[in-house]
Image (cartoon, rainbow, N blue to C red):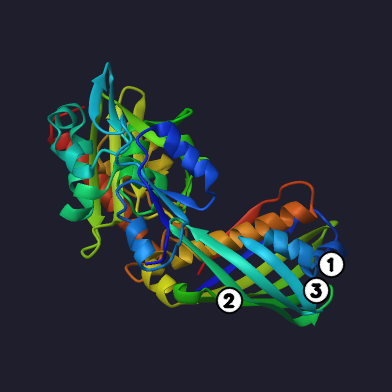
Amino acid sequence: MDLTGSQRIEAPREAVWRALNDADVLRQCIPGCQELVQASPTEFVAKVVLKIGPVKATFAGAVTLSALDPPNAYHIAGEGQGGVAGFAKGGAKVWLVEEEGATILHYEAQANVGGKIAQLGARLIDSTSKKLAGEFFGAFSRIVSPAPADCVAHAE
Amino acid sequence: MFPFTYHRPVELASAHALLVANEDAKLLAGGQTLIATLKQRLASPSDLVDLARVPGLTGMAREGEALTIGAMTRHAQVSASPLVVEALPALAELAGRIGDPAVRNRGTLGGSIANNDPSADYPAACLGLGAAIVTDRRVMAAGDFFLGLFETALEPDEIIVSVRFPIGGWAAYAKFANPASRYAMAGAFVWKGEGGVRVAITGAGQNGVFRWGAAEEALAADFRPAALEGLALDGDDMIADIHGSGTYRAHLAGVMTRRAVARILERGSP
């Protein structure tokens, strides 16, 4: 599934860009992230607990940044194995546009899940992905800018 | 299955203590979602706290102008209860159409609303009837209880004791069930009484059950199915999955709302 959206962040673009590359900020924003360790400037090792309704699965995986164009855009991708639960992977193209001292963060994300978690959750994967993307960018906005910002997201 | 410790406390306080002492503990009510999830190994709680032997969590009673139903009351008991059939027939009907006989004989009211599956039936009744959710520490209005996809206002160690449904007005529930699971593809619980109209939609919204404000306003002005003509939910906000698109569900929610209104009128009320 594809997910696009944008979010206004009350902070200069440079600050937003730095936060997008900061392991500590990313760890706080990725829903259920227990650990995020930087392995190289563009690679992180992550442990994420996915909790949706009755399902609770721990995913071990990697987060990779690519197509870096500071301070404008990058592509962030993550994939993880959740043991018997299955696998999950997703990525987002993120780009930043300056607007009157604030920054508009745009994203185009894709998410895929497979294995049992996909079987059981087939009716809810889109809604879940949208919720998780919303949580990520919502948390990101709260950390980078002091005031809460409007969030607009829609699934396609 | 994987190993876990099974507890069957006989007091509410000990059930609560077990939740507090074990961070990865899960409450077991009817188990109609939880046990399937455990079998699939999509969750592996360290402890299961079975509420079956905790006294005071089952049964139905009329107290003044409210019907109180214990959290561990099974769907089949609600649908067959003369008390519910008389006081809130729409609620008895709804309970009688949840899942299949196995689900109805094991599944519970409290378990259903605590899970808050976006396609479950009971959340629509709670919201539509303006119910109050009673827990071991507070009373919440249904509107404050359901927060989103599988999300409720419950604290991790909070236990639902009962649900209080106000009696009065006229109500009907119409749902289009998925033929395999009997989950609502879209369900509309419509209530009309003193204080206006409520329309609660389940099965359709990305964030779970919700009240359809525009339909409530239209029906408050003119309580007929035709009053909903031209009104539509936004397909982008609806669940899209292998069973149906968001646009389809938005349409279906409108159809179910009209059917529920028609049913209320057929029965010769307002």
Question: Closer to the camera, B240 or A65?
Answer: A65
- For the residues labelled 1 and 3, the Cα–Cα distance comes to 11 Å
Q: Which mark is residue A72?
A: 3
Q: Nearer the viewer, mark 2 or mark 3?
A: 2
Tell me the element at label 2: strand
Using a 10 Å C-alpha cutoff, classify the residue at mark 1 as few (fewer than 14 neighbours), some (14 to 19) or many (20 or more).
Answer: few
Q: Position of residue B45 (x, y in %)?
A: 46, 57
* Residue that appears at 52% across and 59% down: A51
Is B179 above or below relative to A145?
below
- For the residues labelled 2 and 1, the Cα–Cα distance comes to 25 Å
Sooner in the amino-acid sequence: mark 2 or mark 3: 3
Using a 10 Å C-alpha cutoff, classify the residue at mark 2 as few (fewer than 14 neighbours), some (14 to 19) or many (20 or more).
Answer: many
Residue type beneath disc 1: Arg
Q: Position of residue A76 (x, y in %)?
A: 69, 76
Is B246 on the left or on the right of A72, as rendered? Answer: left
Chain containing the residue with disc 2: A
- For the residues labelled 2 and 3, the Cα–Cα distance comes to 27 Å
Residue type beneath disc 2: Gly
Is B227 on the left or on the right of A105, as rendered? Answer: left
Q: Which mark is residue A80?
A: 2
Chain containing the residue with disc 3: A
Chain containing the residue with disc 1: A
Question: Closer to the camera, A49 or B211?
Answer: A49
Question: Closer to the camera, A64 or B243?
Answer: A64
Residue type beneath disc 3: Asn
Q: Nearer the viewer, mark 1 or mark 3?
A: 1
> Toward which corner of the image does residue B52 lie, by quadrant?
top left
Residue under circle 1?
Answer: A18
